Image (cartoon, coloured by chain):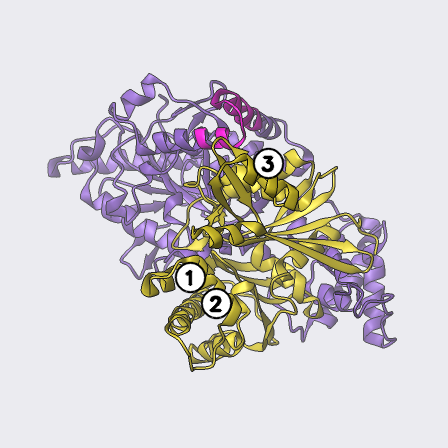
Chain colours: A purple, B yellow
Amino acid sequence: MSLQGNLGENSRLPVTPLLKALRYILSISKSAAWRRPDLLLNSAAIRDLRARQIADPVEKLRYLRQTSPRSTTRGPARKIHLANARQYLTACGLLLCLLTPSPIPSSTRDISAHERRLVGATTEAFPKVWAVEQARDYESYSNGLRIETGLRVSNRARRPFPIYVTGQAAGFGSSPTGIVFHTTESHLAPFEAEENTQLKRVARSVIDAVRKNQSYHYLIDRFGRVFRIVEEGDVAFHAGWSIWADGQGAYVNLNESFLGVAFEAQTEGGLDKIQPAQIHAAQVLTEMLRSRYRIPGANCVTHAQVSINEKTFRIGYHTDWAGNFPFRELGLPDNYALPVSSLAEFGFEYDSVFVRVMGNRLWPGIGAAEARLREHSTANGMPAAKWKAILQQRFRTIANQIINPSPAGQQANAFQGESNVSTR
Amino acid sequence: MSAPANAIGLDVGTSRIVRAQQNGSDFEFESQLNAFVTIPYSKLTANVLSKEGVPHTIQGAEIVVHGNESEKFADLLNAETRRTMTCGVLDAKEPESLTQMRSILTSLLGEGKGRKLVFTVPAAPIGHEENSTYHEATLKQIFGDMGFAAKSINEGLAVVYGEMEATNFTGIGVSCGGGLCNVCLSYLAVPVISFSIAKAGDYIDTSAAQVTGERANRIRIAKEDAFHFNGFFADKTQQVISVYYDDMIRSLVAALKDAFATTRNMPKLNRPIPLVLSGGTAIPQGFRDRFEKILAEAQFPVPLSEIRMSANPLHTTAKGALVAALSD
């Protein structure tokens, strides 16, 4: 089979006014003075046209991959120098002319943003929920969900987050890929009719606290009312040091990659202290979020499952929902059975304190994680302890990158807050 | 071409492992069956195998023959071959999986010496969402041990890279292999939708074997040697194979339709895109026509410019992986 087939020297563009303009833009885009080549090269129209002029399939693929929108998430954003502003505006104008009748997808950025979500996303049936009404202070949805939006606050926008495979960033995601469920650990008044005023007052004080700390995306109070606290597109400081993994890879720092949903509740109280209205609200909220972001059921987990102490390599730094989370009632699989990612992927450990918090009953996921660890160590031909040390070193490398971010990957902000209202 | 000439593209399939390498301006391919069979050890047998150059290893009281020769021995001994992989990923239940995979890869690739290697991995199979990270990480580890600088590529995307340079790597690549059918929609070389279904060649073989009482090995040989879609079958085996082929194609088309119809943020494709079929399970004569007919019945939501077979269905994925390696 000939690789050259229809190969040859890259043919030059025919001289037409349109293509002259295109060539001009491309010449600018290639020049060293041009500070934002991604702005031009990431235009699908330009990339498509230019790639068509490249006969060699390998060169063509190299060009398309190098200029794909994905690459824009990796490098540091660079400022446009004023000296190049005129070139920039000229090029933008020409681009507009070129792109007006464009037979191109609406946004290649969309492709990039959703690529990771779509890979394998169709392997699971997702609920179908749509917005019925969006008023100034509330939203209602087709599954009966009502969200109070009048008290929402903004935070910084969610940044592309790395997805780690074998300890290295193998790709980046940008839309929420999971949900972490929390408890607020706040004071709970008796759930009695005569305590109604007190119940409402406590709920309001919790809301004020979590708004101030931008702690969660959603809070479900004891009456089952759902409050949007932080905008979904923004980061909420709910997970702190945390790890979860799915078929795509591992996520470290779930503030960027997962949504935070808190029940006004206490871990110690268990399910007895959770009101049926809260469970129903959580079920319809989860359904809506899974529908909106195509979130796999296996990525809907509790804070205790993901929380870690990065210094001691112990899991369960936070212990909210360490047991008794009503996965089934929320329409989710029993995710306590899933391998605990921090154990399996990064060699973390658990201690007797955590076992006690779990109610002296280990999740099946702990055993599954340990089995996976053993399997991997065998596959790599080394004792489990040595394999665990390698995994821990992988985590240390990632943690160092997070603590001392390069200009390209400043994620430290995501760690400035923890999740719960009360400090334990 | 400026890319290094010693790069390797590797299609790591459930059934076969295919290596693609550049030789001057040509691509060269070599494949090994991703299977092995164990036979009782005797010094005489071991000597004969060594003399005949049959790849094997001795493990205690057994000789393990792997790769292409394993099928002949299995047929000879009336035994089933064992596989290192199932449903597109390393078989966790097969104790010899890693050892034999390493042996097969070593006999196919030799030493890495720092060469670039791109190998295929499946997308998450519908209904089998278990973590495929282990598969990918383990293979990467093996390649690393062998001295390769290894990267992975989605199998469906490799079909696009191998076949669709004319459309700037925009289109739908379908690879029908042994364990899985992999699908990828790529737009300008960027994968947009990828998935796989766990119905493929092995499903046809095992299902047909159950019905006919034959061994799956024999069904596979019958399928590869003589099966074609023409509506008339001389024997029961061929008729049963056709039933399960039909079932597989219908499942694939249903998954395709569902994936493309339910996906949000589908790029607005203002021109029809091609769909290319590849893989050993797509080889039988009439497969393309049958697929096209069922796809038309299903009213597939994306306009297609053509549905065609890849130029070389057994080598397309490896070729795509090589193109990716060369362009890296």
Image location (x, y in percent) of residue A334 = 29, 42
Counting residues from the start of the chain, the first of labels 2 and 1 encountered is: 1
Note whether B249 is above or below A267 in the view shown.
below
The kind of residue tagged 3 is: Gln
Q: Which residue is denoted by mark 1 in the rendering?
A: B205
The kind of residue tagged 1 is: Asp
Q: Are marks 2 and 1 in contact (CB under 8 Å)?
A: yes
Label 1 resides on the chain identified as B
Q: Which mark is residue B223?
A: 2
Separation of residues labelled 3 and 2 (CA atoms):
35 Å
Separation of residues labelled 3 and 1 (CA atoms):
31 Å
Separation of residues labelled 2 and 1 (CA atoms):
8 Å
Magenta run includes residue A252: no
Residue A344 picture quarter: top left
Mark 2 neighbour density, 10 Å: few (under 14) some (14–19) many (20 or more):
many
The segment highlighted magenta reads A374-395
Image location (x, y in percent) of residue B160 = 63, 63
